[in-house]
Image (cartoon, helix red, strand yellow):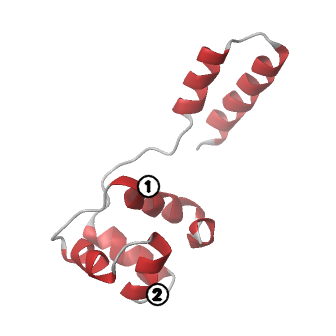
Amino acid sequence: MSNILKSVHNTAKGLRKSGVIDKTTMRKFDAMCLTSVHEFSPERVRNLRLKYNLSQPVFAQYLNVSDKLVKKWEQGDSAPRGPALKMLIIAEKKGLDVIA
């Protein structure tokens, strides 16, 4: 999330706490600030794993998936999706410790 978006979100939280904006509007701000989900290429999967010097089985454990699935992602036979995709994006942005 950008610094500007963080500031806007924090301001909205304060306005909600003060009763100036309603719950529905606050939910819109919350949704706007979620980590966006986008495709994760085989190269990005591999580069992220190598950045932390992890084997495919250990990297798979961080993501709670099988090592065979990580191999498929890296070979382009399959693409990350669902919760695993979100975790990859978060790990890329904020580090692997966040999902450990």
Q: Which mark is residue 54?
A: 2
22 relative position to 1: left or right: right
- Give the mark, 2 or 1, whose residue is nearer the N terminus: 2
Cα separation, mark 2 vs mark 1, equals 19 Å
Q: Where is 84 relative to 55, above or below? A: above
Q: Which residue bears the numbered disc 1?
A: 86
**Whole-percent x, y for residue 23 in the image:** 66, 17
93 relative position to 48: left or right: right
Give yes or no for contact between labels 2 and 1 (Cβ–Cβ under 8 Å).
no
**Whole-percent x, y for residue 71 in the image:** 26, 80
Q: Where is 88 relative to 26, above or below? A: below
Q: Quadrant of residue 3?
A: top right
* Of the pair 39 and 2, the residue shown nearer to us: 39
The 10 Å Cα crowd at callout 2, few under 14, some 14 to 19, many 20 or more, is few
**Whole-percent x, y for residue 84 in the image:** 40, 61
Q: Where is 86 relative to 41, above or below? A: above
Identify the element where label 1 is drawn: helix
Q: Where is 8 relative to 64, above or below? A: above
**Whole-percent x, y for residue 22 in the image:** 68, 12
